[in-house]
Image (spheres, rainbow, N blue to C red):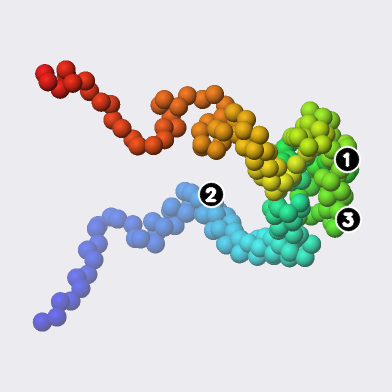
Amino acid sequence: MEDTPKPKEEVPGAPPEDAKDETIKDLHPESETKIEKITKEQSKEKTELPIEKKTGNEKVKKKQDKKKDNFRYIVRIANTDIDGEKKLVRGLTSIRGIGMHMSALITQETGINKDIKIGDLTDSQIEKIKEALDGIEESAPEWMLNHRKDYKTGEDIHLIGSDIDMQLRDEINIMKKIRSYKGIRHERGLPARGQRTRANNRSGLTLGVSKRREDRNK
């Protein structure tokens, strides 16, 4: 036997369901208008969002294409690779031997904007920077130079890049040849500026603290 659905029992004196809905609409006519407005706004937002995303992505792609055409991600100056995303003042400090003061002086001499990115520099501007680096000794004051009173010439020099290591090696070899105190300390691999060697820079066999015989006998 199949179960047959039972008919709904009607309560005596109760209004029908259609009448209930009509009474609710009559009592709250503003609620329907608000709901309609919300649904319309939601539908508009759904249609507008993908269009905005497309336009934003297209703008970013256009900017990237322009950047790729003229922008250099790595620029080589004074035998060093500089990141093209860095600004000019900060980027020049990646060259060994050039700090913030020296890079600011170079930008002033060349007349290039210090806030421009290195990747946006033209070939003529890069050549100007190279010329300024070659003539630092003439333009910069004495206190700015990193190697004053050279051993051979007695002049004030500014060293850049690999020249620093070459000059340092040559001067240490000269000190070793003339058998100066610093040269002997460099030969022995000991600190050359008066540091302690009792606790640090201990060379040879590592020995523990030896106890006295009296303490051992006890």
Q: Position of residue 89 (x, y in %)?
A: 76, 42
Location of residue 19 by image quarter = bottom left
User: Mark 3 sits on what residue?
Assistant: 124
Q: Position of residue 124 (x, y in %)?
A: 88, 55
**Point 86% across, 53% down: residue:** 127
Question: Is mark 3 in CB contact (under 8 Å) with mark 2?
Answer: no
Q: Secondary structure at mark 2?
A: helix
Q: Where residue 30 is drawn, which disc sits there?
A: 2
Q: Secondary structure at mark 1?
A: helix
User: Mark 1 sits on what residue?
Assistant: 109
Question: Is mark 1 in CB contact (under 8 Å) with mark 3?
Answer: no
Query: Can residue 113 be seen from the camera position used here?
Result: no
Decide: few, some or many residues near mark 2? Use Cα within 10 Å; few <14, some 14-19, many ≥20.
few
Quadrant of the image for the N terminus? Answer: bottom left
Sequence order check, earlier mark of 1 and 2: 2
Q: Secondary structure at mark 3?
A: helix
Query: Can residue 57 be seen from the camera position used here?
Result: yes
Foreground of the two, 112 or 162:
162
Foreground of the two, 139 or 67:
139
**Point 69% across, 64% down: residue:** 61
Q: Position of residue 117 (x, y in %)?
A: 76, 50
